Amino acid sequence: MKKINETQSSLSQESAKSLATVVDGIVSCYTDDERLSISPDEEGSGYEVEYVGKSSAWRTAVGFEDEPDNRKITVISVLSIAVPQDLRSQIAELVTRINCDKDDTESSYIAFDMDDGAVVLITSIHLKDGELTFSMFDQMLTSNLMITEDFTSVIMKVVYCGVKPSEAMRLYKDEKLAAKTLH
């Protein structure tokens, strides 16, 4: 926590820093996290994140744009499965159910490519003139990873177990309710 506070303090003192420099400083706070492996991407426009979750591992990219009229951070998690052609309509239905069922305060959504079967979760923050804080970045990254963790298992139930999309969502909601009841 001390490293996070020191990093945030030094970043706040230099508000003129580019978004890339701010993100570099924030990302340095994650070096001791065993769940994550973060490294700069090849283009130098963001970071690649490898995350090992409970049900699977996947790749995540953190990108940023720092134009005067377009300042934003985007986190994109790509699931490690490609949905087979014969199940794509069911996954499209499931993704629609997931996206329509989410809390309005979430800045994430699941995108599904009917052509290649790729499933991705996208989270972004538009900053405009605002300052990116560690708390904002951490909440965005953690939210993306946890939502991906939650819905990977739901998607896998449809793809690998033959569960109907409506039933997969019911099971998900029942599991979440049971988890809340236990706590």
Image (cartoon, rainbow, N blue to C red):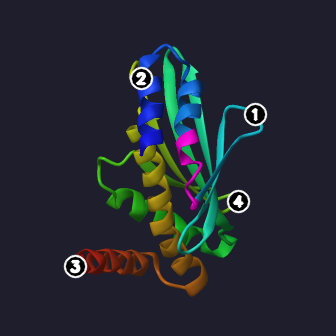
Q: Nearer the viewer, mark 1 or mark 2?
A: 2
The CA distance from mark 4 to mark 1 is: 24 Å
Q: Which residues are magenta?
A: 28-35
The CA distance from mark 3 to mark 4 is: 39 Å
10 sits left or right of 174 in the view: right
Q: Amino acid at mark 1?
A: Glu
Q: Nearer the viewer, residue 37 or 73?
A: 37
Q: Amino acid at mark 3?
A: Thr
Q: Amino acid at mark 2?
A: Ser
The CA distance from mark 4 to mark 2 is: 43 Å
Residue positioned 54% across, 24% down in the render: 19
Please name the predominant secondary structure of the magenta segment in the image. Answer: loop
According to the picture, the residue beneath numbered tag 2 turns out to be 12
Residue positioned 43% across, 78% down in the render: 168
**Which of the 4 image quadrants contains residue 117?**
bottom right
The CA distance from mark 2 to mark 3 is: 40 Å
According to the picture, the residue beneath numbered tag 1 turns out to be 43
Q: Residues within 10 Å of mark 1 (few under 14, many from 20)?
A: few
The CA distance from mark 3 to mark 1 is: 46 Å
Q: Nearer the viewer, mark 2 or mark 3?
A: 2
